[in-house]
Amino acid sequence: MTGLYGVKGWIKVHSYTRPRENIVNFVRWTLRQGDGHAPVEVVNGRLQGRTVVAKLLDIDDRDQARSLIGAEIVVERDDLPPCEPNEYYWTDLEGLGVMTATGEDLGHVDYLFSTGAHDILVVAGDRQRLIPFAQQRVVREIDLERGLIVVDWDPDY
């Protein structure tokens, strides 16, 4: 949660979904703040300019909404739609081993981020590497069962 919107308890939300307003299509969220977490129900939401805003059940004024700023939104895995072939949730790629097509171990996927042009694998190993998540061109194989991503990548780069 990034801020307040209006006086009736609406909140501004930073969303990683594509498109970003899809976050409000999930009726159930879990909000994590510090060591705590609380389930909440989304009753309304929309794209407001370049921001996503949401109204949560029983959050009816700015003071209640203010207490949620900084909370992280978590959606349960069972609430996510299944991926199409050759599509992956980032969370499924995090932690996978990364190896070159010639068999050299580069480490594991620490996390991913998007540049707008494409997603980037941040690979932690003997050093950190930023590898474009460009399927077929760079990413040659993803084997979730083996926990491995094979890339066409120069280990010196």
Image (tube, rainbow, N blue to C red):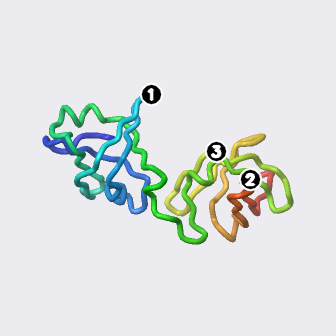
Identify the element where label 3 is drawn. strand
Is tag 1's residue or tag 2's residue first in the polypeptide sequence?
1
Q: Which residue is mark 1?
A: 35
Amino acid type for the residue under numbered disc 3: Asp
Identify the element where label 2 is drawn. strand
Q: Which residue is mark 2?
A: 98
Residue at x 65% of width, y 68% of height? 135
Amino acid type for the residue under numbered disc 1: Asp
Where does residue 11 sit, x and y in percent of width and height?
Answer: 25, 44
The local crowd at label 2, few if under 14, some if 14 to 19, many if 20 or more residues have their Cα within 10 Å, is many
Left/right of residue 77 with respect to residue 136 in the rendered view? left
Relative depth, front residue between 131 and 9: 9
Relative depth, front residue between 130 and 96: 96
Where does residue 31 sit, x and y in percent of width and height?
Answer: 37, 39
Residue at x 24% of width, y 33% of height? 66
Left/right of residue 142 with respect to residue 115 in the rendered view? right
Picture quadrant of residue 154: bottom right
The local crowd at label 3, few if under 14, some if 14 to 19, many if 20 or more residues have their Cα within 10 Å, is some
The local crowd at label 1, few if under 14, some if 14 to 19, many if 20 or more residues have their Cα within 10 Å, is few
Disc sitting over residue 20 in the figure: none
Q: Which residue is mark 3?
A: 110
Inter-mark Cα distance, 3 to 1: 22 Å
Q: Residue furthest top?
A: 35
Inter-mark Cα distance, 3 to 2: 10 Å
Identify the element where label 1 is drawn. loop
Residue at x 16% of width, y 44% of height? 6
Is tag 3's residue or tag 1's residue first in the polypeptide sequence?
1
